[in-house]
Amino acid sequence: MELPKFILGDNTDFPEAIFIVHTDFPRFILNLENDEVEWLEDFEKEDQKELETEAENLIQQATDFYDREVSRYDN
């Protein structure tokens, strides 16, 4: 099955939270309510610097995805 790069999600147990799931490597879930990131990958210590750089870019892409999706509901 082919998945989209980002998936928007919510859960009634967390009524204020909006989640974005990144399905490509490195997989993560971003909680837009508090900007917490839950990584679904295990990383080596030597990957830390590259991960920090890439994470900033991916989180911006996730936020842009959310903004795009919300704007489509408004139309």
Image (cartoon, helix red, strand yellow):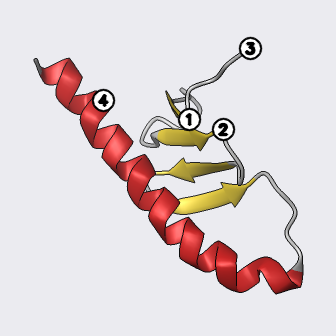
Q: Are marks 2 and 1 in contact (CB under 8 Å)?
A: yes
Report which residue position mark 3 lands on.
1
Measure the alpha-carbon separation of dots 1 and 3. 13 Å
Residue denoted by label 2? 23
Name which residue lies at 32% across and 48% down.
64
Identify the mark nearer the N-term, 3 or 4.
3
Amino acid type, callout 1 = Lys
For the residue marked with disc 3, what is the amino acid?
A: Met
Q: Which residue is mark 1?
A: 5
Q: Amino acid at mark 4?
A: Glu
Q: Nearer the viewer, mark 1 or mark 4?
A: 1
Does residue 69 appear to the left or right of 59 in the view shown? left
Q: Residue at x 66, y 38 (%)?
A: 23
Residue that numbered label 4 is attached to: 69
Q: Residues within 10 Å of mark 1 (few under 14, many from 20)?
A: few
Measured in 3D between alpha carbons, the distance from the residue under mark 3 to the one under mark 4, in whole angstroms, is 22 Å
